Amino acid sequence: MKRQISVGQSLALLAVLGLGSSFATVPAAAEEPKTPQVKWDKCPDDVVAEAAPTELRCATVSVPLDYAAPEGEQIDLTVSRLTAADPDKRRGVLMLNPGGPGGSGLALSALLVAQGLPSSVTDRYDLIGMDTRGIGHSTPVSCGFTPASPYYSNIPPYAVDDAAVTAQAKVAEQAAEQCADNDRDGRLRHLTTANTARDLDRIRAALGEEKTNYLGYSYGTALGAAYASMFPERSDRIVLDSNIGDTHLDRDGMRRYALGMEQTLPDFAKWAARRHDSYGLGRTPQEVRASYLTIAGRLDKAPVAGIDGSLFRLLTFGHLFKQTQYPQLAQTWQAMLEGDEAAARSLRAAQEEPADGALSPADNALTVFLAVTCNDAEWPEDVDTYRKDVAEDRERYPLYGAATANITPCAFWPHAPAEAPVKVDTEGPRNVLLLQNQRDASTPHLGGKMLREKFGDRARLVSVDDSGHGVYVLGRNSCALNTTTRYLVEGEMPKKDVFCRAD
């Protein structure tokens, strides 16, 4: 199904928010574990292939669709396990989440191992990956989005003027209506961060564990912060990497993406300026930035083979996640600067469609992202609010502000939040280690500072002089790697916040 444009769909963020019922109180935690209640078996074929050569085992855990009616309809969650390599050193489970919301995490343990996860960690923990509610091999949900759908990205398109906001409002409203029409089982309204945190506690109990350790990236930090706040007595060592700033992604959080791009593009601009003779994007970082604005402005007026200014900006945003993607980004800029139609067509080239009846991964990811972000918190419903904010952020954050402030389907979502967003609990154990690069397009450093302040003395913040999305194992900083490994292995929480210099 996928085409290159769907890079925006998976950027759903590889980085957030209505329901008919209401909860007066948070349901109690799962019962204390006695014996494990899961049966481990072979993982689905696609997970086996993705994890290879690492061998994982998978199992299914049933949880209530609606925790206000725990004896009602049950849904399945698929979990994976990479067993601790040294049984004599084993200290429990380490639950993993890759972010999204909407990202599949069944093979995340294998990815981390391939990226160099220290053996001192894999010796001591069963690594538990999962497809959280609504995703992939768990009971999935779908809005029925296709490659031809006008709604193709969790980040709205860049709005060059007020008319573009009005046009996007029609797309957003249509997407919300499509989700409602496809929600025949009434499951979408139960996809929330709070319910997913409750699911984690059910999984913990099913695994026979009194407590759980946790490592979450990007939106996974919101989920981990919610779990540590809702079940502080169940949380052991919690690592939250690349924080969005709270227990949910709301409108302010999405608008911070524009801040992240402003802070991160200079790293690419420096890289490209040193390679001017190869890519011709500018001899100084300032000239490279000017090239970005020039290319985007040209494409706004005259798209090249279907690549317009909005998609160009989205592709740039996504390629700032990792410095290893800089060469490909430079190629894209060079092609667009030269008006290379063949290169533009290859960017949009369609890939193989899934078999008839198969759930599209992009549709599934878009659907879960929308359901969770729209259900978690209130979003403005007045289109004029978005017009005003787009105009403001276009000036404040010229690289991308007119995209991230633009209107989303949450403005038209058919359900109101069933409960208030989870409030960060400052009364639990001091067991939350926060990791944050200083320059990160989707989770700017401000997110780590915000969550550090909310957790108070429960948390310590590790700030890294680096660029990109992801710090522990996925990054390249030795200080951050060592600090986090010491915490996971020895339980050594820094006495104060840590600043890690660039390697």
Image (spheres, rainbow, N blue to C red):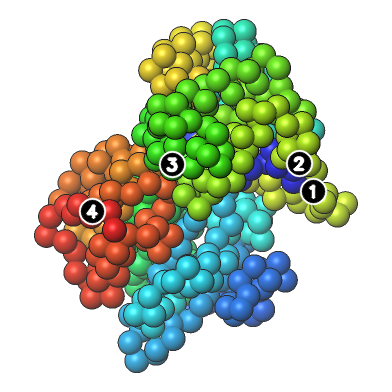
Q: Which residue does the image show at 19% across and 64% down from the upper left?
A: 493
**Mark 4 belongs to which amino acid?**
Arg
Q: Earlier in the sequence, mark 3 or mark 2?
A: 3
Q: Earlier in the sequence, mark 1 or mark 4?
A: 1
Secondary structure of residue under mark 2: helix
**Mark 2 belongs to which amino acid?**
Ser
Give the mark toward the camera: 2 or 1.
2
Q: Taking the image as drawn, is residue 221 in sight?
A: no
Q: Earlier in the sequence, mark 1 or mark 3?
A: 3
Give the mark toward the camera: 1 or 3.
3
Give the mark toward the camera: 3 or 2.
3
Residue on which disc 2 sits: 346
Residue on which disc 3 sits: 274
Residue on which disc 1 sits: 351
Q: Which residue does the image show at 34% across and 80% down from the upper left?
A: 120
Q: Nearer the viewer, residue 408 or 312?
A: 312
Measure the alpha-carbon separation of dots 2 and 1: 10 Å
Q: Earlier in the sequence, mark 2 or mark 4?
A: 2
Measure the alpha-carbon separation of dots 1 and 3: 34 Å
Measure the alpha-carbon separation of dots 4 and 3: 22 Å
Q: Earlier in the sequence, mark 4 or mark 3?
A: 3
Q: Nearer the viewer, residue 196 or 243?
A: 243
Secondary structure of residue under mark 4: loop
